[in-house]
Image (cartoon, rainbow, N blue to C red):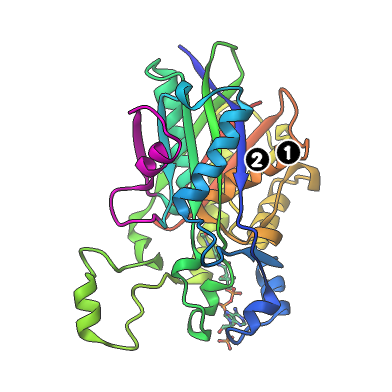
Amino acid sequence: MYSSKITGLGFYVPENIVTNDDLSKMMDTNDEWIQERTGIKERRWIKEGSGDSTSVMGAKAARKAIERAGLTKDDIDFIVFATLSPDMYFPGGGVEIQEMLEMPTIGALDVRNQCSGFVYAMSVADQFIKTGMYKNILVIGSENHSGGLDKTTRGRNVSVIFGDGAGAVVLSRSEEEGKGILSTHLHSEGKHAKELVLEGPSTGRWVPEIIENNDPDDISYYPYMNGQFVFKHAVTRFSEAILEGLEKNGLKPDDIDLLVPHQANLRIAQFIQKKFKLNDDQVYNNIMYYGNTTAASVVIALSEAWEKGKIKDNDLVVLAAFGSGFTWGSVFIRW
Ligand code: UT7
């Protein structure tokens, strides 16, 4: 059986920096509250007219990943694209990226697992490579949150957290034993679907119905989050997903060279770091500068850590995520 390894990675974030002070001009919030509760100092939001969108950013990140893998677009056999903020209701963004990159008519699969999207996408791609079906798969996470947030005081508990951006990796077939993706672990618990949700537009909450009701209190087309409830589940499930991978691979927490957690909230990452007794060099966080970019967050952080030389050959790199669904999971990689 083959194994799969990351051969190229890259990320792209919009140029437009939005600070906490900028937000305090749009809604009743302040830098102190945001930093204390989330660790976020600033985030990137797409500027109108810049041409960026979820798929455009995904394509930009993908180009870098393909180039760094030493490949061309024609070497890619398949696309797995994760987002919760697609450019269109349908079709999904995977096909847009296939077109933007002028790729041959390869398959493109969209993954809808929110903050766990990239972890799920990596697991899917890993299976296709392990079975021998594909050799090089482009795995992308991209989000345009700023286009769909309630930027008034009403939406402040959600809108201050989220940022825009994209990241991509090329996952390639490898025959090196004990290297590459060691294992992936995926979970969900749908009974909490409505604790972090965007209900409409959907077939359950259709646009004409929202317009007809013309109800100023109907904000079901904005994301809703039961923050404290989500926080409590996040710390538990993150830990479980990491422990599961450690046990499966006969490893202990101290074997982790770099944990790249989904950038949901710096406090969550710090809790996990403390729980597993990891030092600062063993955990990579960049939520301070990009906010929570959901399906893009793990891959942006992974790419940035790699660009900064924080990942060496043979390192044990652990990706872990938790989010809306609820869904959660981890990816264990021997680099
Ligand atoms: O990525 C997917 C997974 N997501 C997560 O894991 C996020 C998990 N949750 C969280 O990170 C936190 O719950 C938040 C950062 C979202 C919120 O922090 P919190 O400590 O749970 O605050 P809270 O929602 O309990 O609100 C505390 C107070 C409230 O005021 P009162 O009722 O105490 O007077 C809120 O109205 O803070 C107020 N508040 C704000 N104040 C200033 C809420 N949002 C803001 C804001 N600025 N942006």
Task: Say which amino acid is labelled 1.
Answer: Glu
Q: Residue at x 38, y 56 (%)?
A: 87
Q: Residue at x 58, y 33 (%)?
A: 65
| Residue 153 at x, y percent in the picture | 53, 85
Q: Is residue 212 above or below residue 94?
A: below
Q: Which residues are magenta?
A: 86-112
**Residue under circle 2?**
303
| Tag 2 secondary structure | helix
Q: Assess whether mark 1 and mark 2 are in contact (beta carbons under 8 angstroms).
A: yes
Visible residue check, residue 134: yes
For label 1, the crowd category at 10 Å Cα-Cα, with few meaning under 14, some 14 to 19 and many 20 or more, is few
Is residue 110 shown in magenta?
yes
Number of numbered discs on residues:
2
For label 2, the crowd category at 10 Å Cα-Cα, with few meaning under 14, some 14 to 19 and many 20 or more, is many
Mark 1 lies within 8 Å of ligand 1 (Cβ measured):
no
Task: Say which amino acid is labelled 2.
Answer: Ser
| Tag 1 secondary structure | helix
**Number of the label disc, if any, that sits on residue 307:** 1
Describe residue 71's horizontal placement relative to residue 22 as left or right: left
Marks 2 and 1, how far apart at CA: 6 Å
**Number of the label disc, if any, that sits on residue 330:** none
Q: Residue at x 77, y 37 (%)?
A: 310
Q: Quadrant of ligand 1?
A: bottom right
